[in-house]
Amino acid sequence: MIFGIDIASMLLGGVAAGMVLFIVSVGLSVTMGLMGFVNLAHGGFAMLGGYAIALAMKHWGLGFVPALVFGFVVTAAASAMLERLLYARLYRASELDQVLFTIGLVFMMIASVTLLIGPENQPLALPTMLQGQINLGITQYRTYSVVLIVVGIVIVGGLWLGFERTQIGAQIRAAVDNRRMAESLGINIARLFTITFAFGSGMAALGGGLGAEFLGLDPQYALKYLVYFLIVVAVGGLGRVTGVFYAALLIGVLDFVLKKYVPQGGTAFIYALTILLLLWRPQGLFGAKAT
Amino acid sequence: MTPPQAGWADHPAARALASRHRVRMWEPIPWVLALAFYFVFPKYLGFGTELLVTILFALSLDLVLGYAGIVTLGQAAFFGAGAYTVGMLAKHGIWKEPITGLILAAVVAAAVGLGSGLVLLRTHGLTLLMLTLCTMALLEEAANLAHDYTGGFDGLDSLPIAPLFGAFEFNPLYPKTQYLYVLTVLFVCFLFVRTLVYSPFGQSLTGIRENMLRMHAVGAPVRRRLVLCYALSAAIAGVAGGIWAQANAYVNLGTLGLDRAATVLIILVLGGYSRLYGAFIGAVAYMVLSHFLSKIYPTAWQLGLGLLLVVIALFARNGILGIAEAAVRRLGTRQATL
Amino acid sequence: MTAPLLETRALCRNFGALAAARDIDFRLEPGARHALIGPNGAGKTTFVNLLTGVIQPTSGSILMKGRDITDVVQAARVKLGIARTFQINRLFRRLSVLENVCIAVAERVGAAPSMFRPAGMRRDVVEESMHLLDTLKLTADATHRISELPYGRQRLVELAIALGLKPEVLLLDEPAAGVPSAESHIILDAIDGLPRNIGVLIIDHDMDLVFRFAERITVMVSGAVFASGSPGEIGADAAVRAVYLGRAGHD
């Protein structure tokens, strides 16, 4: 095999993984940046969404894409309810209370899924169209990875447009930068929080479904990858869509490359790098400097 | 300038402050109970030992979280540092004596706490939370990688710990020695923490927790205090880890993981933080429940635990002790009005 | 001529493109009763933060009794005798009034690092704190938690904490802000009663308070010193009236 092609295929795999990381983490970044809420249950929403998608395909014979839509809607609706009923009571609470509450929530999610469905991994069968290889000119490559990259780019583009060009996007940006100012401008913060939170959880659900192919899907998913999602958010900067995108790509590719060449020390290297980076820039690589 | 007139010592506020550190009537009770346990439940001494170690670990967290207000998810890093210090020294035949081994565990854990505290405590909020998590994960990975020294994923077992005072064997199957040994160490560490939190140093930690900006403005070296507190707390966590390794004669990656860090946080919060005895109440409640429930119904146990956390965060922020205090206060006012 | 107690020379501080402090030359004499006034956003609180070392100047220098303290960190400036109160209360809300003051006094007398002696047994610290509460007529509240106190009394605790540091320079950032007018005389009396050996700089909007208290007034506008003089001179200055007093009238 030619060395250049090897690198290209590795990069593609890393970028595809990064896209999934991005899709899951972007909601976490925006809700944390907007609400200042330490939501350790975000991975739980990705897990629940993944299950909704996998089960809808298995039991109702839904196609992959309709199932994704279904997972997004169900998770968004459920999380909106949770936000109104419970999260909203803790916006002004201490970090510790938020941490406890969301850890408790994750435990409940994991236990409920284990009780109702079982502890085993849920296979998520991709449509035949997405299996197999695709000819990219220089090399053959896995179709699904290419699809993931395209989907990721479409989503980041869509989010960017939504953030920059729509009314609600402008409101979110204003509230992330200066919440009191936004409130005095008459923005309905409570409604904004619910919408953003629901949307972020819905995105996590999409990520859970799209990434199930190589991250797997079992109840422990909710905690297993949490540190990764948090790292992506911390590196990308709170409330920064493009920041999280670059950070997710960076970590996805890094993780892929490291696992290949240093299968033992790869994860340790990413942790060390994150620590150094956060010490150098506590606001993340792409976050705005706090004043 | 005239010296301030004497005589304020009798003012109720001054008296309240001067009597706060005195030993309460009920304070010997937990220790008497712990001793009684030794005689009444000789079959459960293994469980009792584990319980006492957990109290010690939760106490270390209380110092840093309850008093100094540092929200950390990485306290198990120090527990693990202490456990691996004892484990590696014993397994490789370098040091087997238990008491000095614990001191070494404390020193190593304090050094890790000091080093990481110096850099981590520049940050706060979510970044700090992340950094404590990452530091712990990094140590876990390091312990996993260095398997020539640490045993990697399998850990180190059958640690040859020397008999206590050269006379009392640590028998994993019949842990009489361990129980009394751990109880003594817990008592010593508790006295230290208790003295600390009522001292001016402890008072200034509370000040930092309550209002950091104000502490800067009264000229307190805030970061130095926090780092010192972090290192002291790490030392105690290291003792807890070291003694755990000695009592069980093994050490594994579980001593360093998020599971252990989250569990100790839950225990402390369940009992009630910044209350000294919260660690005791929380550990007893959690360990007893988990002992009977988690093995039979592990999933239901996790569900109940999650529900409990949610309820505590929403309704009972001061834990079991906080509820008890509120009840006592209500009783008191009712009697006063009668 | 002796050096002033506190002096700034060409002090500047920029936040991005915004100049929050511009070439400020300022002198606070020993025992002064000095007021700093100016419209909202004039940079008064920034100036206090520069003097206390919370933020660093972009350029210029700060001197205390002729010694350059520009690079001295906040905690060390407190030790040199610069204390402040905050515009919004920054107190230890769950601690008693006595403890609030004790924390400051313990810090000043160097008791705070001590780990092995109960705080309540430091007689010197407790006596001094109680004495201080007595001079501010707060002894009746000493056992109460801050959160149980009316706002006006909380403002007095702010003052008590600052005085517990035995300052030579006392910076009062809107000491009566947020206090209902029925209670504000408590604050005003307390300020009137401050020992004369302390140089006091008071930052306020309240013209009654400023003219009652100050022997010298500095007016800041847009981060720069606009005028400085006796209350009579400032009161008669047509330009000051135009930019500040007049505008304040519209608030």
Image (spheres, coloured by chain):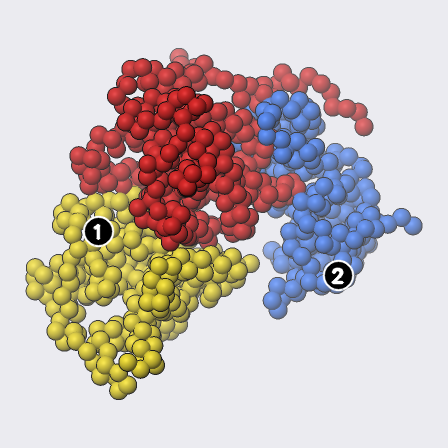
Chain colours: A yellow, B red, C blue
Residue type beneath disc 2: Gly
- Mark 2, Cα crowd under 10 Å, few <14 / some 14-19 / many 20+, is some
**Residue A262 % position (x, y):** 36, 64
* SS at circle 1: loop
* Residue located 44% across and 30% down the image: B98
Q: Residue A219 got which mark?
A: 1
Residue under label 2: C60
Is residue C202 visible in the rendered structure shown here?
yes
Given the image, on which type of amino acid does mark 1 rest?
Pro
Above or below residue A192? Residue A115 is above
Q: Considering depth in this image, is B287 or A100 the residue closer to the camera?
A: B287
Position of the C terminus of chain C, as image quadrant, is bottom right
Task: Measure the alpha-carbon separation of dots 2 and 1.
Answer: 60 Å
Please, is residue C132 above or below residue A261 in the view? above
Task: Name the spot of residue A250 as percent of width and height, x first.
Answer: 39, 68
The residue lying furthest to the bottom in this view is A137
